[in-house]
Structure formats: C-alpha cells, structure tokens
Amino acid sequence: MSGSIPFYQKHHRHYDRGYRSRETESAISQYQQSSNTYSSHSSKSTKGHEFESGLSDTEEARAKESAGYLARRDLFARGMESERVEHKSRRTVVRESAERISLSKRIHENEEYHKRLNEDSLMHTPEFVIKPRSHTVWEKQCVRLHCTISGWPEPRVVWYKNNVSIDPMAKPGKYKVESSYSVHALEINKCDFDDTAQYRVSAMNSKGETSAFASVVVKRFKGEVDESLPSPRLPPCLEYGVKFETHIVEKFGVSFGLEGETLSFGCSVIIYPSLQRFQPEIEWYRDDKLLVPSKWVQMHWSGDRATLTLSHLNKEDEGLYTLRVITKSGFETHSAYVFVRDGDAEVAGAPGAPLDVHSLDANKDYVIISWKQPAVDGGSPILGYFVDRCEVGMTHWAQCNDTPVKFARFPVTGLVEGRSYVFRVRAVNKAGMSHPSRVSEPVDAMDPADRTRKGTSAPWTGQIIVTEEEPVEGVVPGRPCDLSVIEATKNYVVLSWKPPGDKGHEGVMYYVEKCVSGTDSWQRVNTEIPVKSPRFALFDLAEGKSYRFRVRCCNSAGVGEPSEPTEATTVGDKLDIPSAPGRVVPTRNTDTSVVVSWEASRDVKELVGYYIESSIAGSNTWEPCNNKPLPQPFACLSHFLYGITVLECVRDAMVLAWKQPTFIGGADITGYFVDYREVIGGVPGKWHEANIKSVSERAYRVSELKENMLYQFQVRAANMAGVGIPSLPSETFKCEEWTIAVPGPPHDLQVQEVRKDSLVLLWKPPVYQGRDAVNGYYIDIKEADADFEMWRGVNEKATDKTFKKIKDLKEGESYVFRVRAQNKAGVGKASDPTEPVEAVTKPGTAEIVVNVDDDGVISLNFECSNLTADSKFVWSKNYMEMTEPERMTLETKGNKSKAIFKTPSEEDLGIYSCFVTHTDGASASYTLSEETLKELLKISHDHKFPIIPLKTELAVELLEKGRVRFWLQAEKISANGKVEYVFNDNVVHQGEKYKMNFDKNTGTIEMFMESLGKEDEGTFTFQLQDGKATNQSSLVLIGDVFKQLQKESEFQKKEWIRKQGPHFVEYLGYEVTPECCVRLKCKVANMKKDSVALWYKDGREIKVNEKLDFSEGVLTLEIAQISKKDAGIYEVVLKDDRGKDTSTLNLTDQGFKDLMNQVFSVIANSSTPLKIQSTEEGIRLYTFVMYWKCLIVMFFTDRARVAGGLPDVVTIQEGKSLNLTCNIWGDPVPEVTWLKNEREMVSNDHYILKFESGKFASFTITSVSTSDSGKYSILVKNKYGTESGDFTVSVFIPDEEPGRVRTWC
C-alpha cells in the first residue's frame, strides 16, 4: 500500500521509505535471477528440462560490479560524487541483460507447462485474494487499481468501465493494463472528469467467472489546473504481431543543482525484443510540459540510455522531470524532482535573481513585462526591481527604469515598432543587486491586431508580412462595449473593451479619451494614430488623481459615439500583499523527506505561488526549500493518526479506536483503512487489509482473527487526494474474549467550548457493555503535568449523559480528562486521557446569540472569525449532530451560521451547540430553557404582530361652539406612519364634515366635527400603521352616551351664541346672611351702558328701588324676614341690542324648604346652650334662639330596651330543643339582632329566630348538639338608643360521668 506522495514524486509508481533505492534493488535482483537461470541453462542444456541455480565466478563478479555501479549512481543523486571504473562496455551489459530476461521467460513457461501436466488436481474457479479499492483523486493525477486473483487454469482478466470493456490500445497512453504472477493492475493516466466511473475487473476460466468492483472519483482543485501530459504518439508498427516490453533501469533520482551549473541525468532503457530497425520515441517533460531542444535543454538517446542535459541551470529549470519511453505496445515513465539553488551573489546579502520573465501585454510602442519574485531576499526586504531590454541580435542591454519598481510587472516604453526585444530583471535590496534573471522569449513591438494577421517570413527577405484587408465602403461603427480597467498602477493603466457589434465590413480602430473625475472635460489620449486592438495602456497619469475613461470607434466612414465611461479609477500603487498561509503541517514521508500542507492565503488577487522554507529546530535560520513558487497548497494527505486502543475483544474479533489531531490539514477525511499483522515470537508478520471499503467512524471491528494470537494494527486516512501514510504500529494486543462484568472504556473523547474557566467534554459509550447495560459515567480530571495519583473526580454522582460541562477551571492551566463507565456490576476501566487542554479564552471567541428578527423568527446565530476555506459549521442538539433537523432550518453565509426554529415549542428545549471544523476548536453552546422559550415566544409575537404603543386611547371632548374633537396620542410614530379614520366600518376622509390633523412629531391624531347629528351615532375608530406595526383604538357613542354628548354639544353651541351678548356668568342663586336675610344674586358679563336687567317673580316684574350697578358684574335682591309669602319663581332678564339672556330660580315646594333649612340653620347657630329637664312626660331638652324669640323642646321617652325574660345560663341535654323568649320595648319599634360568640346569626331550620308584635322576641334551637354550646346575645336598636342581653348555653351528654358538664370554649 503506497503512502503519501510528495509534490516532487507524484508520478512514481511505488513509494515507500526506500523510494530512492527500491528500483535499484529490483534491478540487482533481476540481474541475479537472470544470471542464475542463464548459467543453469548453459551447463545442462542437453539434459532436458532440468535446471539448477548457481552463479559462476565471472557472473558473480559481474553482478557485484553492477550493484556497486548502481550504489554509486544513487550517491551521485544525493549530490555526492565518486569515481568509478567500467570493466565492460555498457552495450555488452545491456545485451546480456536482455538475453537473461528472455531466458527467464522460457523458465517461467516451462514451469507453467509442468503445472498443466497435472491440471485436474489444480483446477478451481477464480478467486479474489485482494480486491481492488475505490479511490478519490485530484484531476490530473494517476490512479492505479490492483487486485490479486487465484485460479487454475490461469484466468483471463478483463477490466470494464461502466460495464464497457477497456481497450488500452484504443486510447494509447490513457490506460495501462498489467498482469504479473496473479497480480493484475489497471493504471489510469492523467485522470479527468470523464474517468469518474465504476470499474469492474472480471476473471474467467473454464471453471467459472467472478468479478469485483471499485469506484474512481476525480475532483478538481479550486485553483488553476495545469494541462495534463499529452497522450503519447505511438510510432508506426514495424513488425506485425510483435509486443515490446520496456524496462527502465538505473533511474535518476531527486537531483540538486546550483544556478549557473550544468546538470545531466538519465535512465537506461531495456526493450525486448531488441530490433535494430526499431527505436522508441523518447519524450521529456518538466511539470507536465513537453520539453523541446534549445540552448538551455539538450536531449540524447544512445539506443539504450536516455539523457537530459540542462546547461546553465536557472531557477526556471526547477520542477518535476518525467521521462516517457513510447513503443508500439505502450509506454513507460519515470519521474523525479530537480531542485535548483541560487548561485552565490556578487555582493554578500544581495537577493536572488527573479524568475519567469515574460511579456504580459505587448503593443507597438510598449511591452508590459511580468516576473516572479525570488525565494531568497538576502536577509533584508527587496526594495524593488530593475528591468533591462535588449534588441534581438544585439548585445547591448539598456536599463528601462531609473528607480526600482515594487510591482512584479513594469511597462517598457520607447520601443521601435516592428522590432523584437528580449528582457531581463534584477532585484535589489539594501545590500546590493542580484544576478540578472534568465532572458525572456523575444517579444515583437507591434499592434496586437497586426500580430494576429502576421504571416510567415518571406524566405528570400526575412521580412514580416502583414496581410491587410481590402478596404470597402462602410458605415460609421457603433459604441464599444464592456469597457473596463483591467490593471492600474502609479505608472500606467490598462483598458480593455469589446468591439462594437455594428462595425461594418471593414475593420475599426479606436480613440481613447480620459477625464478627471468630477469634471466633464474629455481629452483624447492617442490624438495622432488610433489603435487597432481592443486593449490600450495609458501612461503619464498624475499619481493620486482619479480618472474616467471612454473609447470611440472609427473607420473610413467616420468616428462613432463614445462608449459608456468607466468608474473612477485612482492612480497609485496598491500593494495587495497576500496574507500569510496558515496551519503548516509537515508529515514524515521517508527517512529524509517530509510532506508539507498548509491553508491557502485568503482573499489574494493574482496569487503567483508559495515558497517553502525550513529551519533546523532551535537555529532560527531559514533556508528555502523551493526556488520556484508552487502554484497551490499541496493536497497530499497529512493526517497522522495515533492512539490506537482496543474497545472490545471476542474470540475472533477486536474493536479498535484511534485518534487524530484537532487540525487535520488538507481536505476533509472521507474514511479510514485498517491493517493488521500477526506477531509471533515477537516478530511481526506481513500487513493485511482489514477493510476493503473505507469506514467513516474512528472505530472499527476487525473480524476473522485467531483466538489467543497477538496482533498489531495500523490505520490510514483517506480523502480526495487518496490514501495517506499509515500510523505507527499499535501496541501488541492479544485476541481473547473479555469476560469482565464491568463495562469497557468510553472512547472518542473530544473537548469543545474551551473558555478560561470551563469547557465541555464529549465522549462515546463503551462498545463492551459488561454483564449489564451502562447506567452512568464518571469524569476524572488532573493537571497535565501532575502525577498519576493526582486524578480526581469531577462529579460525585454518575451522569447518564455523554457530555459534561466542567467548570471552575483555573485560567491558563492545562488539564487532561478521562471518563469511566459504570453498570450494576461496578465502574469499568478508564478511557485514554485526552490531549492537554489549556483553560483560556482565545481571541475572537464568540458565543451563540439568540435573535428574533422583524418577522418574529427565532434563530440561534454563531459567527467564526478564523474560518478556513474547508471549514464547516456543525450544529448539534444536546451534542447530537443535527444533519437534517425536522424542526429547524440551518443556514450558513460566509463566516456566519444560524439555526432557525420553524415552530418553537417545548419539543425544542435543550442545549444547542455549534462547532466549526478546520479551526482551533471554535465552538459555543446555548441552553434553551422553558422560561427562556416563553420569553422568546412573547418577543416573537410582538415582532410578528408589532403594535404601535399609545399614550392615550381614543377620547372625545367638546370644544367652543359645541365642536366635537376625537383624539388619541401614540408614544412614537415615524414619518411613514399612516392613519385611517373609520366610522361604522366605513373610512371617512377630510371634507366639510370631518377635519383631520396628524402631528407625527408628537404622535397626536385628531378629528373634528362641527356638531353631532342623529346619523353620527355609532363607533369611531382610528387605525394606525407604521411599517409592519399597527394599532387601533375605538370609541363607542350610542344610546344615552351619544345623546348626552349630543345634548352637551348643542348646549355648548347655544352657550357660545348666548355669550355673544349680555349673559350670565353665574346663574341666579341665593345665600342667607348672618342677619338671617335671604339674598338673591347672579353674576353677569359682557354688559354695556344700554344693557338692562329686569327682575320677575311669578312672571311679574319686581321694581327695584336702587339703580343696578354692573361694575362688579353682580346683581342682588335681598328679602328680609322671609316667610311663605315670599315663595315663588324668580327670574332675571338681561337684554340689549345684541340679544338677551335669562336666569330663573325656583323657590317653591322643595326649593323653598331647602331655603328655609338654611335659614333655620342660621337661627340654630344663634341658640343658647342646650338644657335638660326631667318632667312627667319624659326628658325635656330646650334652648333659646336670637331671632324669633322662641323655646325649642324635645322629648326622648321611647329608647329601645330588653325588658326581661332571658336567663344568664342555660344547661340542656344533647338532643333536646331549647326555646327562650324575652320582651322588647321602644318607639319606634326596635331592630332585633341575635349573636353567637359575637357573630350575627341567621334564622334557619336549626336556629329559629322570631320577633312578633313588635314586643316579643323568641330564640329556638331544634335538637341541641354539643356544637351549640356558647355565648349568645340579643341586640335591640332604634333611633333613640341601643341595648343588649347576654346568656350562655351549655350542652351535656347523658352517659358522661356525674358532675361533668361539657361547656363551650
């Protein structure tokens, strides 16, 4: 099983810790086997088909010599050089090797022949010893499906893709089918999307047929994907029916070169059969791009060895080199990485040379040059770059810029149209200048439109021929479209646009115009000659200013309308330096190499690639690992699994669990593969696959084991990139059945929601339950650096949950945790402890926030600030993941995620948590309790049905002239608030009858009516709306309420009319003076000189002796010694030319009595002190008064009294009836009330209370019981007094002891 593949080795067929020497060992073994068989055949060729092994002295020396040669070649690949001496020519060795391979085949055929001699005993149907595995790979990678099949006769193996047989010759170079010693393989080269399918391998012989399936899923990187290797071009078949076998030996390994040096490497190629007329096609690739011979690259094929020479190494030469040997029967490849290090700088501390200089844009008078920054800056930041140019055919280099440019691109101007140029770039820092980069490819200074029409050079002149279209009469072209600024720096701005749709039959040219933002003054840039291509670079713009641009088309017919102008573009450098990549994870690949993966930089524009640096631990000296930037983060797996434990064990199976780091790097893990091996006598055996199909959980049951045997296990993780490197072998476990009564250990402990004083611990139940089911868990804690004896319990009582929030942690302290399960038999073995967890709240930690939006939707919201490209939000309820929740909707946008409740109810109570993958543990939780839910539902209802709060409800009041005002006031309302005025379900509007006013500043809403008629009786409603918020208030005016309001309105109207002339402010009334005179008076207003006031009694005018005085506005009329003759109806009339007013006072009947009572009150106040005198008639009270000399006498002789008849104590036997009667006296007849224990009694069937003839009061208790014992009272009362009588009732039981009497208490 192959391990993780580094980026510089991804085309190797086999990879392990000895990938540099494995092929060499295979070649040596092949030479030895060939020598053995060849020697045996030579010595005993006349004795039939009998062979024996052995090496002659000469052949043994030759094998040793070959091994030494290969070992020295391997040392040379590591950068070490040694001398070697060849004893024989290479051609002789290759020829003898081919002969040995041929002889080996003959031996194999002979063995097969002997098997067939007794084939009946060996024949059986094909069986899959190892089935093919499914793979998920990146596009452009190779995938190899392999299986092992047993069966006799040897089965015929066919591969199918989606049930269609695969023919390798139909697509040469795409598929490669191999079969060797029952091991069959299908290799798919350079996978693309079409290779995603289900593959089937079918094995069939005369005894039967069997099949196995595997799936291949091909996915694409998010970044740019390079073009794949082209399919090989197979040469024509020279010999009909000949099948060539190609073997690449003495392979080149990873090479290291220095800039400026020459590097050669190659491989020996053995092709069988060897035909002189046939030579294979040799192709070399660098980073999947076909190489062609040039002054930098030379290729050589000697007939048995392919060599590639890189003269004057440059950093552009760094990459993955692939040798492809193509024959009629297929092809073989070999790849290895070549590193190129920077040469020594001319000045110490100077940066490395830039690389990959090329033309980004070219026109007739400028060329925009782009390059890549070097990996080595010399120890100080690079200040900028200098660009040099040289005309093709010349040797003089001219510097193009006077000051260093910081951007990795620069526009070179001042070129001569039609000439070709090459360019180079130098970097500079404070220490000095770097070496110049490798020169670019030649660039022609000519219009892009002319370049597209450029023909081949005329062989007799060498001049460039440009074909011109024959001009025809055309029309004025239309507007260019899609004008945009594709690049802007302080030195230049590049515009791009699309030609107009209506440009006529002839070609068009363009004028470019610019305008300073904020003005409308357009200035043509290319005034002399219009440009032909839809792309243009502008120079000499003022740095810091903003410009707009537009383009016009022109031809022979004229100049067209301008395009739409661009948005304002500010001239200046914007150095969008990429952010630092994150989470660099190195993983050991071999003894001398590692695989590095990292998170891509975020929000990077025009990313060039990544440089990797390494440093010896503790040295703080960083050295570049690659001098050519990698285009994307390496996608190789880097999931290093560890902590393999046994969760359950039976006689023939074991359940394993394992751990993985919190940050796994690369793509998400899609599954795991488990391998096992036997350990006999302390010696491990071969690894075997436990599962063909990957498992998604970090636990797996390995079956079909042998009882009491010792085993070791290893686990591999798989993702989109393939299967990763295996974990370290586990401890040795014995396969024997567990019989303990207590449960096994819990597993998969995870820590979430780490804060400075708390965290949440999660775990999974033990697989082995023991004799009884698990009924609880105990959590243990200790400081990470504490001794084993420092473990202590977190919970005294076992919890039945599989999670626990642990509080009261010490900030900054690191802790480890473990969990133990219990059942009825006791507490089981503790789980493996967690990794140390520091109690600290990390910066940017957020909590779940509950929110109720304007629509009343309740949601839980979580935001993560350190989100990665592969991060996902995982929501859980009670820490159980909600994949497709029925009661919630999960939404994620950017770095925010929310869980929305559909219909919140008590079913939704619980703990909700959110965990973000591919982060440093970003997580939080929220507990939804019953009380919280009620509060949220109330807020939701208010948001869903918002109400405009009111200060006052709708009210009505009367104004001057009897006008009616309906009004209310809202607490707050916006300027968009609206009001509808409704009367009896009909909307009323502003008009003659209704006047409306709405003051939005104060929230006061008013409606006015001049008067109320009969048709206005009903319900008035004000309906308010402000956005979604609504409210209304109603006022019902019907029946007496309406009539009273209508009457009051009419009265107010009349009052207003009345007050327009002389009128009464206070109507006619009276008062009694201390002298016992009656004074009639009223208060008037709005009087003038000609106003008159007339007094009337019973309709007859009263002549007043005095002239009325209106200065104080009071009219009076005094009546002395009032008597019955003064009773009557008095009236005062005010009048003048403006109108009149009348006030009337009724002093008859009750009115006169009330007046006399006031008079008598004044007389009584003048009386002498009250005196008492006892006479024969009764008690005499008398006094003398000041007015009307008289004596007032009152007699009090009829006060209410209880005359007698009631005893003090009544003793009666239980069950008897009690009847008491007493005499009552008083005039008027008194009121009688009976009391028991100070509480008033009511007559009923048990207590019969009677008062007869106004004199006799009786009290009867029917069937006396002990509860009737108590104190009874009778209370009599009239207007002259009150009196009471008391008695006690005691009830006894006949069979009680003599002398004992039950009394009340």
Image: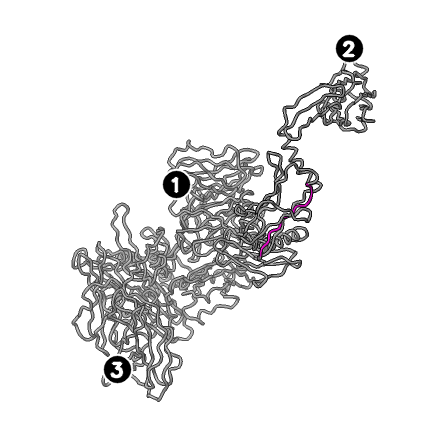
Q: Quadrant of residue 72?
A: bottom left
Mark nearer the N terminus (2 vs 1) = 1
Instruction: Report the residue marked by disc 2.
Output: 1299
For disc 1, the neighbor class at 10 Å (few under 14, some 14 to 19, many from 20) is: many
Give yes or no for residue 1132 being in the magenta stretch. Answer: yes
The residue to which callout 3 is attached is 464
List x then y, in percent, for residue 379. 22, 54
Position of 978 with respect to 26 (left or right) is right
Q: Which tag is nearer the camera, tag 3 or tag 2? A: 2
- Mark 3 and mark 1 lie on one chain; the one further toward the N terminus is 3
Type of amino acid at the residue the image marks with label 2:
Gly
- Residue 354's place in the image compared with 444, above or below, is above
The answer to if 365 sits in the magenta stretch is no
Give coordinates of residue 158: x percent, y percent. Answer: 50, 65
Mark 3 vs mark 1: in front: 1
Q: Which of marks 2 and 3 precedes in the sequence?
A: 3
How many dots with numbers?
3
**Image coordinates for residue 575, horizontal then vertical, percent:** 29, 60
Residue 813: % across, % down: 38, 37
Say left or right for 1202 vs 1026.
right
Magenta part, dominant SS: strand
Residue type indicated by callout 3: Ile
The quarter holding residue 402 reads bottom left
Amino acid on which the number 1 mark rests in the picture: Glu
Question: Where are the magenta residues, as a range?
Answer: 1126-1136
Q: Which mark is residue 838?
A: 1
Q: Residues within 10 Å of mark 3 (few under 14, many from 20)?
A: few
Residue at the image point whose x is 32% and y is 77% from the top: 533
Q: Residues within 10 Å of mark 2 (few under 14, many from 20)?
A: few
Q: CA distance from mark 2 to mark 1?
A: 89 Å
Label 1 SS: strand
